[in-house]
Amino acid sequence: MTKKGTLDFEIDELTNSIKNIISGDSFQTNISRITKLDLKLITKRKGWLFNWKGELKHPERDIYKLTIINNQHIIQGLVSLEVKTDHVYMHLVESAPFNKGKSKIYSGVPGNLVAYACKLSFQRGDEGNVAFIAKTQLIDHYIESLGAIHFGGRLMIITPNSALRLVNKYYSNLM
C-alpha cells in the first residue's frame, strides 16, 4: 500500500489496447464512468487495493473503468481523474487483481488508463497535460515508460508531446 495520493502503478508494456499474456491476442477496450453496480465488483474483499467507494465521495473526481469492448461486465482497471484548470490530475490508477503480478491475464492496462487521462486532457483543451504524484522508486520508470517529466519532489508531469504519443498508441483510430 502507498501513502495517500501517491501512485505506484507499473507500466508493464505499452500496447495498442490490452494484450492477453498467454495468447498474445489484443482486445479493443472501452473506458466509461463506473456505476453504482460496479462498486460491488471493486471491493478490497475482491482483491482491489484502493477504496473506490470512498473515492466516489469526492465530487470533483470521476472514476473510469477499462473494459474489453465485447465484455463490458469485467473491469480490467480503474483510474480516478480530476479535471483542473490547465491539466488532468490522476489520483489513483489500479489494474484489476487478475491483471497484476506474474500471473496476470492482460498487459497494457495501466498504459491504457494513463493514455485515457491524456486524451481527456486534450479534449478539455489542456493540451494533454497530466500530473500525478509518484512513489519515489518509480520516478525513473515513469520517465522511461511514459515520457513523464520529474517536476520536483515526487510530482510527475506528462507534457503534450508524451501525451500525444500515448494517445496515438491507444486511440489512433479515434483521433
Image: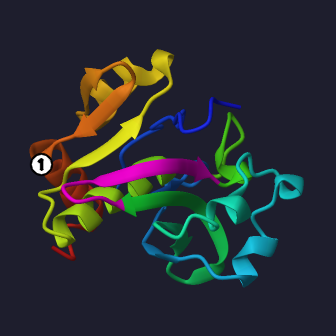
Q: Nearer the viewer, residue 10 or 68?
A: 10
**Position of residue 161 measured from the top left corner of the image (x, y, whole percent):** 10, 45
- Check disc 1: other Cα within 10 Å, few if <14, some if 14-19, many if 20+: some
Is residue 86 magenta-colored? yes
**Position of residue 63 measured from the top left corner of the image (x, y, whole percent):** 53, 67
Residue at 39% in and 23% down: 154
Q: Nearer the viewer, residue 77 or 128?
A: 128
Horizontal placement of 58 versus 83: left or right? right
Is residue 149 magenta-colored? no
Q: Nearer the viewer, residue 38 or 90?
A: 90
161 above or below 34? above
The N terminus is located in which quarter?
A: top right
Q: How many marks?
A: 1
Say which amino acid is labelled 1.
Pro
Q: Nearer the viewer, residue 23 or 45?
A: 45
Where does label 1 land, which residue? 160
The residues colored magenta run 83-95
